[in-house]
Image: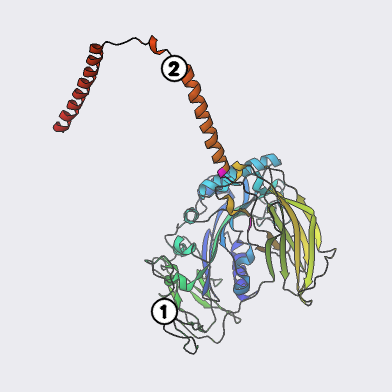
């Protein structure tokens, strides 16, 4: 693991065990990435003791979320809002080793305390509906068809007593079609003590966050209890990770639409034979681009949050940046604390003063040594196979780049209309030493354990969980077939021809030295899939309705006329005298004249 993430995890471990000395803590980590990208990781942590929590005494822990957890009997909560895709090949390992990110859309899992499964499902429904209103999201659509009970992939992060751990039920739900927007960011900031007005949270702007190439917002609530003791602390951690394009983010505020730069502002390679006034081949710069916090985020840091407590003795500032030692970093004001990392590392930390704006500026500079990008130990991809509207298949490729065998758990939560054929499950492994055209058959020890719960139409989805073992320096291919169900026409969304979103697969890499589920782990998620289903012609119901309405109108009109009208012969109609007919016509004309005169008089008065 790189020095940057080693420091990050050390700080996380220390802060998790230092809840007695600090109730609120925040930190910003900046890390430049290749291709003019910047990784910004915001981390906020607040604590509340169990005694004050039970007495409804909230200081830094938000009351709105605390009362929801109490009412739903939720002991541990993990909520994710994610957009985009992390580029493993160019950006390296994932922030927090993937433990603070979720699949595309919204992902939620929690440990609920209940005596029976029915009671746990009822409290889970209460939790999703309450969180839906709190975060302005569609979490109330996580019903029984989108809820599973993972058996091997997730483990609780909190520390429990022996008694409290007996009646805990783990439930997991996803909404891959959910669109994350500013409506979710605003309640996220409301949970912070400074609420985006001061500290590093003042940089969180919806225009910048949702313009990022990849972003995820995470909320983690977990108890921290001493062994067999009632002295517990409820810890809430809020994390925002995003990858920003430095050049794209540097555009002015009055130009919200990204446009290519003018041709005269682009440095062209004049050595190209096709270089002309209207053609240009841009020069790839080897130097590090110039940027600043104000230029990237559109605003400076509004000082330090007065409620945040930092650890001066442990050499940790509020703002850290991961750049080579020779990279010039210019702070905007005097610092309370600054440190250059030791042992050849590249981490520097700053702590701004309260009440004053703070900015970091990095000028354009040519570097002889660049910050190393550590490649992840594992890659994963997933795609659909087959053709036609009746059946299909899924192909997942998991690549192990490490020289050691890796144990991992593979979790898929499929919708009920995607009926899995378990007997078609196949695994093949291909070592890197073989040619690309050859593959080895699956070994018997590749799949160590299978947990499968079939779907029930309109009641629950398919739950597939595997415990796999991948040999070193090899790729494992997992395939299976499925059948597409035909929905009722009322079950299709308005954009039925777009397809249905399938939640990403969750992969948890276990410790290579210890294959048990409680070893060190790393999480990664594949991209979501778009499943096309047989879609009817929705114009046909409209045609049927119009034709039926026309037939009913003709039939009802004819029957109504027959029942109401009275048909008589012409000689039965009493004859009218000519003078009587003339007087009736003149009377009607005179009545019309009087009505028009009355309207004219009213108009003149107006």
Q: Is residue 372 magenta?
A: no
Indicate the position of residue 187 as horizontal and vertical percent values. Answer: 48, 53
The disc placed on residue 565 is: 2
Indicate the position of residue 225 as horizontal and vertical percent values. Answer: 65, 54
Is 299 drawn above or below residue 55 in the view shown?
Answer: below
* Pointer 1 residue: 263
Horizontal relation, residue 439 to residue 205: left or right? right
Residue interval drawn in magenta: 529-539
Q: Is residue 537 magenta?
A: yes
Indicate the position of residue 164 as horizontal and vertical percent values. Answer: 69, 48
Which residue is located at x 61 percent, y 77 percent? 373
> Closest to the observer: 524 or 67?
524
Q: CA distance from mark 1 to mark 2?
A: 81 Å
Which residue is located at x 59 percent, y 58 percent? 104
**Quadrant position of the N terminus in the picture:** bottom right
> Of all residues shown, which one is farthest toward the bottom?
271
Which residue is located at x 42 percent, y 69 percent? 353
């Amino acid at each position: 693991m790189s020095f940057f993430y080693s420091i990050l995890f050390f700080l996380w471990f220390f802060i998790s065990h230092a809840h007695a000395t600090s109730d609120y803590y925040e930190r910003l980590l900046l890390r430049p990435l290749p291709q003019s990208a910047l990784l910004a990781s915001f981390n906020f942590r607040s604590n509340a003791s169990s005694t004050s929590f039970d007495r409804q005494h909230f200081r830094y822990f938000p009351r709105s979320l605390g009362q929801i957890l109490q009412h739903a009997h939720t002991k541990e909560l993990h909520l994710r809002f994610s957009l985009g895709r992390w580029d493993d090949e160019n950006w390296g390992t994932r922030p927090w080793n993937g433990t603070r990110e979720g699949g595309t859309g919204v992902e939620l899992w929690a440990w609920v305390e209940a005596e029976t499964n029915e009671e746990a499902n009822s409290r889970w429904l209460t939790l999703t509906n309450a969180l839906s209103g709190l975060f302005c999201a569609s979490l109330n659509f996580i019903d029984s068809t989108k809820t599973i009970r993972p058996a091997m992939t997730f483990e609780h992060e909190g520390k429990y007593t022996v008694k409290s751990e007996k009646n805990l039920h783990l439930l997991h739900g996803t909404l891959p079609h959910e669109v994350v927007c500013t409506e979710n960011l605003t309640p996220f900031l409301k949970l912070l003590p400074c609420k985006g007005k001061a500290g590093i949270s003042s940089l969180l702007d919806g225009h910048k966050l949702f313009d990022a190439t990849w972003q995820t917002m995470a909320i983690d609530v977990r108890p921290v209890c001493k062994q067999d003791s009632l002295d517990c602390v409820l810890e809430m951690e809020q994390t925002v990770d995003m990858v920003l394009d430095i050049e794209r983010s540097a555009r002015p505020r009055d130009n919200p639409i990204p446009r290519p730069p003018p041709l005269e502002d682009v440095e062209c390679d004049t050595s190209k034979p096709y270089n002309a006034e209207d053609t240009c081949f841009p020069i790839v710069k080897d130097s590090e681009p110039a940027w600043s916090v104000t230029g990237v985020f559109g605003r400076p840091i509004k000082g330090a949050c007065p409620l945040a407590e930092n650890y001066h003795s442990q050499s940790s500032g509020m703002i850290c940046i991961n750049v080579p030692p020779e990279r010039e970093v210019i702070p905007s004001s005097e610092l309370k604390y600054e440190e250059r990392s030791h042992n050849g590392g590249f981490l520097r930390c700053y702590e701004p003063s309260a009440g004053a704006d703070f900015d970091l500026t990095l000028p354009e500079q040519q570097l002889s040594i660049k910050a190393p990008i550590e490649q992840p130990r594992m890659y994963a991809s997933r795609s659909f196979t087959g053709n036609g509207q009746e059946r299909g298949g899924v192909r997942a490729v998991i690549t192990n780049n490490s020289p050691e065998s890796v144990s991992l758990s593979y979790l898929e939560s499929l919708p009920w209309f995607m009926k899995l054929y378990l007997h078609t499950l196949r695994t093949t492994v291909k070592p890197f030493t073989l040619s690309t055209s050859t593959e080895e058959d699956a070994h018997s020890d590749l799949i160590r354990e299978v947990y499968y719960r079939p779907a029930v139409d309109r009641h629950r989805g398919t739950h597939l969980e595997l415990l796999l073992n991948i040999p070193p320096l090899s790729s494992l291919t997992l395939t299976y077939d499925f059948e597409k169900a035909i929905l009722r026409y009322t079950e299709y969304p308005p954009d039925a021809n777009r397809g249905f979103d399938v939640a990403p697969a969750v992969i948890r890499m276990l410790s290579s030295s210890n294959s048990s589920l409680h070893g060190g782990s790393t999480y990664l998620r594949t991209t979501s899939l778009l499943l096309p289903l047989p879609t009817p012609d929705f114009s046909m119901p409209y045609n049927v309705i119009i034709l039926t309405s026309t037939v009913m109108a003709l039939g009802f009109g004819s029957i109504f006329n027959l029942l109401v009208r009275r048909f008589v012969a012409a000689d039965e109609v009493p004859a009218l005298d000519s003078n009587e007919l003339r007087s009736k016509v003149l009377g009607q004309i005179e009545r019309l004249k009087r009505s028009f005169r009355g309207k004219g008089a009213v108009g003149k008065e107006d």
